[in-house]
Amino acid sequence: EAQVTQNPRYLITVTGKKLTVTCSQNMNHEYMSWYRQDPGLGLRQIYYSMNVEVTDKGDVPEGYKVSRKEKRNFPLILESPSPNQTSLYFCASRPQRSNTEAFFGQGTRLTVV
Amino acid sequence: AQSVAQPEDQVNVAEGNPLTVKCTYSVSGNPYLFWYVQYPNRGLQFLLKYITGDNLVKGSYGFEAEFNKSQTSFHLKKPSALVSDSALYFCAAQLSGSARQLTFGSGTQLTVLP
């Protein structure tokens, strides 16, 4: 089954404790990206990747890191989480052509206390 | 910079009535436009897209959307709403040929009342 898998689905952590949210897709898609969803703001792009070892900042990259060492994986790293990073996070992937729809993971609800 | 606006945070409609969820966009160039739906505790699911050609596009679950270039709009419609259509709907734009990912609107919560 074609899918984007995120882990964990839910995470509660404390300020400053490094964490990683994993994302994996099995569709051989070139493009992957991370979004955060906040009430009234919709989805805002954090980082995106056009292919292995090619990443770029989205609209709200501060406080986040990503890496793309393999085509299928695109982890999101919070080196020192803060409460304002409490949000619902989505990973997405799509083929290279820009007229194709994206596939989304189930989401990771992160709470930073 | 491109932007997408969904002017209504909430839309309520009675079951069986037609529904419209509004979306306008601001993109310099030819946009690709998408509608996604999000059910509680789920990821976003693709509904339909406009790439080129016929201004009326049909998608999943009986939804359709009308692209209007002069009004820069891409409203989502359904002739007869179902209670099961209640969900959060997002409009999104992708600039053709761009490496950037989607730009989303703020979302519209649709509630279909029995």
Image (cartoon, helix red, strand yellow):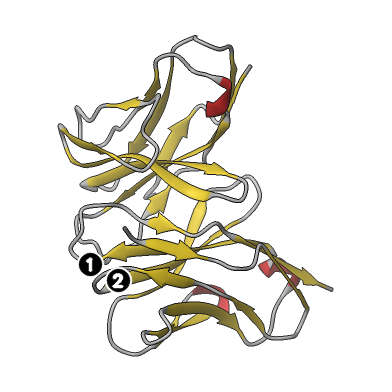
The answer to whether residue A113 is above or below residue B53 is: above
Left or right? Give the position of A32 relative to A3: left
Callouts 2 and 1 in the same chain: yes
* Horizontal and vertical percent position of residue A88: 55, 37
Q: Secondary structure at mark 1?
A: loop
User: Dividing the image into 4 quarters, which one contains the N terminus of chain B?
Assistant: bottom left
- Dot 2 and dot 1 residues touching (CB under 8 Å): yes
Q: Residue at x 21, y 36 (%)?
A: A55
* Horizontal and vertical percent position of residue A57: 28, 37
Residue annotated with mark 1: B96
User: Dividing the image into 4 quarters, which one contains the C terminus of chain B?
Assistant: bottom right
Left or right? Give the position of B85 relative to A49: right
Could you say which disc has been placed on residue B31 in the image? 2
| Residue B2 in view (yes/no) | yes
Residue A100, image quadrant:
bottom left
Q: Residue at x 49, y 9 (%)?
A: A17
The answer to whether residue B37 is above or below residue B73 is: above
Q: Secondary structure at mark 2?
A: strand
Q: Residues within 10 Å of mark 1 (few under 14, many from 20)?
A: some
Residue B88, image quadrant:
bottom right
| Residue B63 in view (yes/no) | no
Left or right? Give the position of A86 relative to A61: right
